[in-house]
Image (tube, helix red, strand yellow):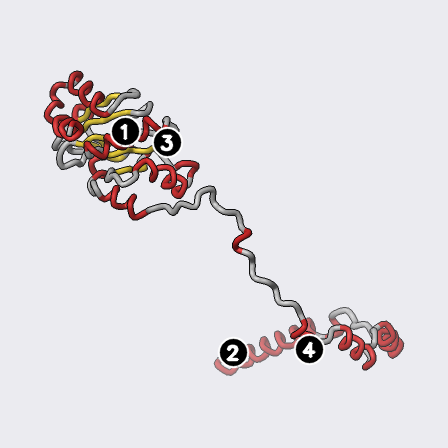
Amino acid sequence: MWATDLLLRHRITLALALALHATTSPAAGPAAPDISEADLERVRREQPAVTEQDIEQARRRHRMPGNAELKAAPVPSAPAIDTLPQPATRAPIDLEALARGYASQSDAMQAAEGLARGPGLFVFVSQSMPQPALQRLIDQAARARASVILRGLAKGSLRETVAQVQPLIGTRQVAVQIDPQAFDRFSIARVPSFVLVRDGTRPVSCAGGTCAPPEAFVRAAGDVSLDYALEHMVRAAPAFQGDAAGFLQRLKK
């Protein structure tokens, strides 16, 4: 039985080998084309021949320049810096003075979000306001220790903003912030506007992130002085008299 199985397997293996040989035999596929000597000669004639003369001509046409030629070549001149466009003003921007002014109220940003340790007073202005009115409010904000809030950059440039704000600040120590969210936080629709935030205010969630609760601040708007705005807010909301007292006292000094 074992011998019969072995013989049968041998026959099957032999049959498979013959079948594979038949399918891969050259006779089973198309005949390969014959290449004659005439075909080879035609290819040789069509193939361009590169001679030593051709190589020499190409070498002379694309030769490397010599040392003398390299030394004689003109050297590109350095750009004339003095001929470049110059800024309209050559007065340097005193960023250090601005930084000192901003540092006068290190917690001004927290105060604008209703996190003040003590009452907060904010003056919302725009650089499109008349310069005398803007100058007066910045001077009063410095004396009252209030924060001046701008919505955005002048012409989209920080340098342009600094160049416009620095002459207004001068040597005063006043906090100037660029905070468009503060305009939304206190619903500022016109400038100048004034916001007095009550002492001990804790922030609440709002669309602007964190805001002072509506009952924790009072707002006024109009082309008026800072002390007039404070007195108006106290008359409209007597509960804020104590919060406004310190600012009014500093303004009257």
Label of residue 137 in the image: 1
Q: Position of residue 9 (x, y in %)?
A: 55, 77
Is residue 210 or residue 96 the one in the foreground?
Answer: 96
Task: Give the mark nearest the N terminus, 4 or 1.
Answer: 4
Task: Give the mark nearest the N terminus, 1 or 3.
Answer: 3
Residue beneath the point at 69% across and 75% down: 69
Question: Residue 131's quadrant in the figure?
Answer: top left
**Mark in front: 2 vs 4:** 4
Q: Which residue is mark 2?
A: 5
Mark 4: give few (<14), some (14-19) or many (20+) Cα within 10 Å. few
User: Helix, strand, or loop for circle 4?
Assistant: helix
**Mark in front: 1 vs 2:** 1
Label 2 sits on what residue type?
A: Asp
In the figure, 48 relative to 172: above or below? Answer: below
For the residues labelled 3 and 2, say whether their Cβ atoms are less than 8 Å apart.
Answer: no
The span from disc 1 to disc 3 (Cα, nearest Å) is 12 Å
Task: Give the mark nearest the N terminus, 4 or 3.
Answer: 4
The span from disc 1 to disc 2 (Cα, nearest Å) is 112 Å
In the figure, 166 relative to 24: above or below? Answer: above
User: Helix, strand, or loop for circle 3?
Assistant: loop
| Direction from residue 52 to residue 74 in the image, left or right | left
| Direction from residue 215 to residue 169 in the image, left or right | right
The span from disc 4 to disc 1 (Cα, nearest Å) is 72 Å
User: Helix, strand, or loop for circle 1?
Assistant: helix
Q: Position of residue 126 (x, y in %)?
A: 35, 30
For the residues labelled 1 and 2, say whether their Cβ atoms are less than 8 Å apart.
Answer: no
Which image quarter holds the C terminus? top left
Is residue 202 or residue 129 the one in the foreground?
Answer: 129
Q: Which residue is mark 4?
A: 68
Q: Which residue is mark 3?
A: 127
Label 1 sits on what residue type?
A: Leu
